Image: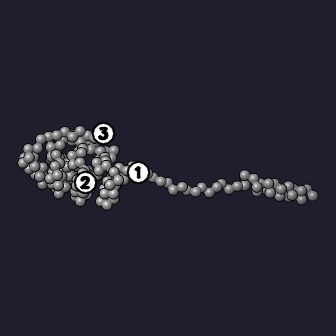
Amino acid sequence: MKMADAKQKRNEQLKRWLGSETDLEPPLLKKKKTKVKFDDGAVFLAACSSGDTEEVLRMLDRGADINYANVDGLTALHQACIDDNLDMVTFLVEHGASINQPDNEGWIPLHAAASCGYMDIAEYLIGQGANVGVVNSEGETPLDIAEEEAMEELLQNFEINNGSSLYFAPPQL
């Protein structure tokens, strides 16, 4: 009889346990989709970097700042110069990008084009009014940082023919 009583008590315990909180499985956690909201300026810079002029135009129509600068002071025009993307450089300038806007180190887009040796971009920027005499925070003009001989000649000829004077570009902080 003891064995039967023990089994009955055990069955009663199991019935109580089956309905208790101890028996419950942890709820399956549903993964919520994480939404990341990027700063509008960062989205604008990304659209420019990808060369998506249609998206850039839509963003400009919705009020995007064509001269938005990232934490380093780089604008879309700086980046297009660094990326050797003359089409985007032209697009941005035609839509009002500031040709002489310095980054945090006083570099204007012409410094970037001169440093990278991108003649076509440098010629375009100069033709659009880029200041050849801008001095960055290290005291360097685009001519000072040009490494290609052809770039040096382009900048020297412009300075000689146009009487360029030095201009210190205060960094954008």
Q: Which residue is drawn at 31% across and 45% down?
A: 72
- Is the residue under label 3 in contact with that under label 1 (CB below 8 Å)? no
Residue with the mark numbered 1: 38
Disc 3 residue crowd, few under 14, some 14–19, many 20+, Cα 10 Å: few
Scheme of image coloration: one colour
| Residue 84 appearing in the image | no
Q: Which amino acid does label 3 sit on?
A: Leu
Q: Residue at x 28, y 48 (%)?
A: 67
Residue pointed to by mark 2: 95
Q: Is mark 1 on a helix, strand or loop?
A: loop
Residue assigned mark 3: 173
- Tag 3 secondary structure: loop
x%, y% of residue 37?
A: 43, 51
Picture coordinates of residue 66, whole percent (x, y): 29, 50
Q: Residue 108: which numbered mark, if any? A: none
Alpha carbon separation for disc pair 2 and 3: 24 Å
Name the N-terminal-most of marks 1 and 3.
1
Q: What residue type is labelled 2?
A: His
Q: How crowded is mark 1: few (under 14 residues within 10 Å), some or many (20 or more)?
A: few
Please give the name of the residue rendered at 85% of the width and 55% of the height, measured from the top-left corner. 9
Foreground residue among 56 and 30: 56
Residue type for callout 1: Phe
Question: Seen from this angle, which residue lies furthest right?
Answer: 1
